[in-house]
Image: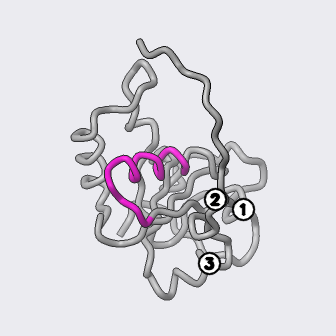
Amino acid sequence: PVTPVPARFEAQFAAWRVRSREQILANLAERQEQVLDARAPGRFTGTLPEPWPGRRRGRIPGSLNLDHATLMNADGTLKPPSELRALVDAAGIDFERPIVTSCGSGITACVLAFVLERLGHTRTAVYDGSWAEWGLPGDLPIETGAPR
């Protein structure tokens, strides 16, 4: 076991690490960044109901899925880097391109971003609004069903 040592840390906001709804919408046409969704597969495909009241089912068009729960061991620790990389590769991620992570509310998207950073990917951002924002009723496009 590791014994934590008290330390001081000052966080610095890095705006380039956060994406807005407008940036994600613009990316649908440009496809410069891959969108990686951390939600469970059923929520990603729209076959399971959303836990958020009033949210539509589905995903951001063109996004890929990597359920954040698959990254963890039974004891809640992260799997070894070789296993994490295999999961990332199996999800269809191009490690040479920028990635934006998303989830239900922007929290587990940070788990994906952390894992990608640990694996050496340095161009990862988080869509903070995630499905809590994108899934609201309105005119934002969505996809359902199996990914194409």
Residue drawn where x is 46% and y is 47% of the image: 114
Q: Which disc number belongs to residue 23?
A: 3
Mark 3 residue element: helix
* Residue 133, disc: 1
Q: Position of residue 129 (x, y in %)?
A: 69, 60
Q: Are marks 2 and 1 in contact (CB under 8 Å)?
A: yes
Mark toward the viewer: 2 or 3: 3
Q: Amino acid at mark 2?
A: Ser
Which quadrant of the rendered structure holds the C terminus? bottom left
Q: Residues within 10 Å of mark 2 (few under 14, many from 20)?
A: many
**Which residue is painted at 70% across and 56% down in the image?**
132
- Side (left or right) of 41 relative to 140: left
Mark toward the viewer: 3 or 1: 3
Mark seen at residue 130: 2
Q: Name the side, left or right, on which 134 lies relative to 41.
A: right
Q: Is residue 74 above or below residue 85?
A: above
- Which kind of residue does numbered mark 1 sit on? Glu
